[in-house]
Amino acid sequence: MEKRIYPAIFHKEEVGYSVTFPDLPGCITEGDTLEEAFTMAQDALGIYLYTLKEDKVDLPKYVAPEVLILDKDSFITLVEWDELKYLKRTSNKSVKKTLTIPEWLNTKAEEENINFSQTLQKALLEQLEEA
């Protein structure tokens, strides 16, 4: 699972802020308040980067914020994308999986009333955090 940061340019508008990402063409959003604009920027970044990953396109490198030129009513902030957090928040649909385990392990787990789905989810999350 990847983590990335990208500079976002917040432009003060008559009402609220618009947000652009100089390294991500077409990744634009807005919000009526600064807080809303930042939340929308996180969502826009997540959708954009996850779409690139699904299309098997390399994620672009970001330009150093200090080289960007800003208008007087604009500022830069860094926005983080954490793929695992993004997927947890946006993709909670359950899927059925078939797996194979030794019979003795199945017997012991059933004797202990172990929930197989919860156990597998916990183990997968631990494995992903280590990666």
Image (spheres, rainbow, N blue to C red):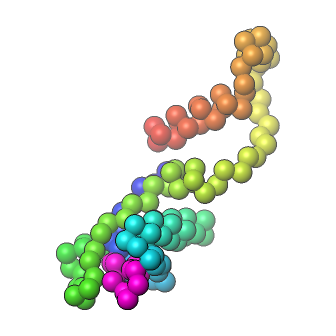
Quadrant of residue 31 within the rendered picture = bottom left
Relative horizontal placement of residue 40, taking residue 107 as reference (left or right) = left
Up-down relation of residue 45 to residue 127 (above or below): below
Residue 2 at x, y percent in the picture: 46, 54
Quadrant of residue 24 within the rendered picture = bottom left
- Looking at the rendering, the stretch of residues picked out in magenta corresponds to 9-19
Pick the residue in front: 103 or 2: 2
Up-down relation of residue 84 to residue 130 (above or below): below
Relative horizontal placement of residue 58, taking residue 93 as reference (left or right) = left
x 57%, y 50%: residue: 88
**Outermost residue, left side:** 66
Membership of 74 in magenta stretch: no
Residue 16 at x, y percent in the picture: 40, 80
Up-down relation of residue 6 to residue 109 (above or below): below
Q: Main secondary structure of the magenta part?
A: strand
The answer to whether residue 32 of the structure is visible from this angle is yes
Residue 23 at x, y percent in the picture: 38, 78
x 42%, y 55%: residue: 3
x 25%, y 89%: residue: 71
Residue 90 at x, y percent in the picture: 60, 57
x 75%, y 16%: residue: 113
The answer to whether residue 61 of the structure is visible from this angle is no
Membership of 11 in magenta stretch: yes
